[in-house]
Amino acid sequence: MPSIQHFSCKLTACLVFLIPVIANAHSDTEHLAEAAFSEAPEVVSCQLENGSEAQCYKLTMGHLPEGLQVGPFCPKTLSDKGGLWDWTGDEAGLYRIDRDFLLLLDELGYRFFEDNGSVNSVDNATRPPEYDHACINVTPDKSVQITLLLPVNPTMAKDPTALGTIAKVGVGLDGAPIFADAPSIQERGHMPALDVCGGHIDPGGWYHWHATASDIQTVLDAKGVDADCGVAQDSSALFGYAFDGFPMYGSKESDGSIPVNLDECGGHIAQTLESEKPSYHYHSPESFPNLPGCLVGVQAQNNFSTTASAGVGSSRSGGPGGRRPPDLKEAAQALGVTSDTLKRAIDSAGGPPPDFAAVAKILGVSEAQLLSVMPSPP
């Protein structure tokens, strides 16, 4: 087996070497902030997505980490400064939501403001947008609780799980869930603005990250964005745990050096301050969103739910206590994949509703082919 210092290969070709080395890697609630929990964490029996039985940490959080100052999101007028947006159209880049950016969008055919300079903003948790293009600014719901399941002892999956739009990534040490890239303006027509630390409030009323907030300054500096995140910055610190149980760090090693031999998901085997031996972990890139590009481990089934009446993990999205999700067996058979593979692809693509274009890309089929076999929700 190659030494850690000379370890370099593609993820899917390296799994046979990784398995013995990651034995000491494990998620550990002692690193999560005590104030993150609305109930004491507990270890419960769970079933992983590969069908195996396991032990999982059950974590219950509230709508917002205690003491976290969030915002700004949408500016009120063109004279104000809002949060951040990762624009993916012409002149793509990470921008501060301000006059210059909103005028750029206007030139590109996306007008988010009125003639008097007021910005079209809407709380889409309470009403649909009245405008062709609106900046989304959701009101928090203090009654919401979130329940997560993380494997105590992470195990490598046969293949990595792609992370599409709004895909579940993990949980921060502060208790805020972490999701992949937010939906684009081109896709949804509106802008669910992020604050200057890379987070925002879900339509269900709870706050979550779309970035490694403790290392967001590295990205802001690299992209030339004038913003100052209130979260303490440490580019080598542990930020949280992915849903496969592996830890997520900033863009640097504990000694301040640049990580080497990263796999396609942005992870590698190396020593950390939290591990006794070299173990697998993720590092954030300097691009946005600065999160893993995929997850290498096996996740727990039904690993995310909320008490919210809308948004990700709610009863309206088929979560616990809600409607039963559609039977995917026939659709999977028609596409030549397993039901589990189809379900993972749908979960990775976010929603509800899921981004079917992203699902099709993950599965290697056309969107039309996918939609032609998908069952209607019950």
Image (spheres, rainbow, N blue to C red):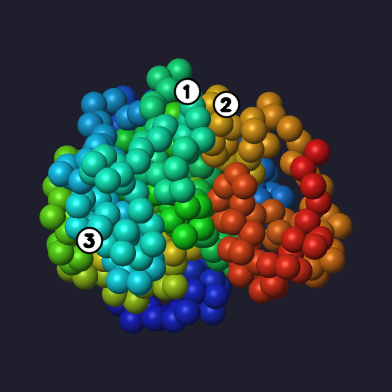
- Residue at 14% in and 47% down: 228
Task: Please tell me whether mark 3 sits on a helix, a strand or a loop.
Answer: helix
- Residue at 50% in and 52% down: 188
**Which residue has dot 3 on it?**
219
Can residue 107 be seen in this snapshot?
A: yes
Figure quadrant of residue 356: bottom right
**Callout 2–callout 1 Cβ contact below 8 Å:** no
Kind of residue at badge 2? Ser
Residue 362 lies, in percent from the top left, at 61, 67
Quadrant (top left, top right, bottom left, bottom right) of the N terminus: bottom left
Relative placement, left or right, of 216 versus 62 is left
Tell me if mark 3 has few (under 14), some (14-19) or many (20+) residues whose alpha carbon lies within 10 angstroms of its own: many
Task: Please tell me whether mark 1 sits on a helix, a strand or a loop.
Answer: loop
**Callout 2–callout 3 Cβ contact below 8 Å:** no
Kind of residue at badge 1? Val
> What separation in Å lies between label 1 and label 3 (alpha carbons)?
31 Å
